[in-house]
Amino acid sequence: MSKNNTYSVSLQKIYFSNALTILSLFKDGTVFKLTGADEIHSDFISGGSFLFIFNNRGRIYGKFLTITDREIIMEWNVEGFNRPNEIMTSVEIALQDQTENCVLTLNHKYILNEGAAMAKQRAWMEILNEVEKMLAGKS
């Protein structure tokens, strides 16, 4: 199947915070813990790998292709969860500081089927909303 016959999830969230604070929530594993994984292994550097184990359900794993002050690009693979395996999807997260807030744009691309795309959209939205609650609690 070509990359043209795939689904994407695109989300945008505005946080009353700055890009470096949000980036630190990825670096320290906070965002990854919000996936509900039972085990999280993450080497948060460009070229580093990650593995999230969901006991008796499945696993998510991949690589951090790029990490900068404003961008995280990950190769994202999913096995299990009573769905077909998904290999080589792409998660791109961009952070743009504005005057009093930061805009996070998330694009999850190359998803093989509509059901998986809908599940990812729900999951990413829940995670981004939880980040918003956490940041609100810090102010």
Image (cartoon, rainbow, N blue to C red):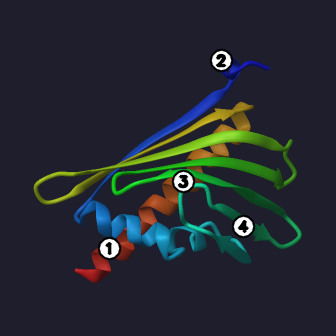
Q: Earlier in the sequence, mark 1 or mark 2?
A: 2
Which residue occupies the foreground of this view, 104 or 24?
24
Q: Disc 1 and disc 3: Cα gap in Å?
A: 17 Å
Q: Identify residue for label 3.
A: 124
Q: How many labels does the image show?
A: 4
The residue labelled by disc 1 is 135
Give the residue number, with chain letter if any, for mark 4.
52
Q: Which residue is located at x 78 percent, y 41 percent?
A: 87
| Element type at mark 1 | helix
Q: Earlier in the sequence, mark 3 or mark 2?
A: 2
Residue at the image point whose x is 30% and y is 66% from the top: 20
Identify which amino acid the numbered label 1 is placed on: Leu
Q: Residues within 10 Å of mark 4 (few under 14, many from 20)?
A: many
C-beta proximity under 8 Å, tags 1 and 3 = no
Q: Quadrant of residue 7?
A: top right
Spatial CA distance of label 1 from label 2 is: 37 Å
Residue pushed farthest front?
Answer: 47
Q: Which of marks 4 and 1 is nearer the N terminus?
A: 4
Image quadrant holding the N terminus, namely top right
The answer to which of marks 2 and 4 sits earlier in the sequence is 2
State the SS at label 2: helix
Badge 3 amino acid: Trp
- Residue topped by disc 2: 4
Q: Image height check: is 74 above or below 118? A: below
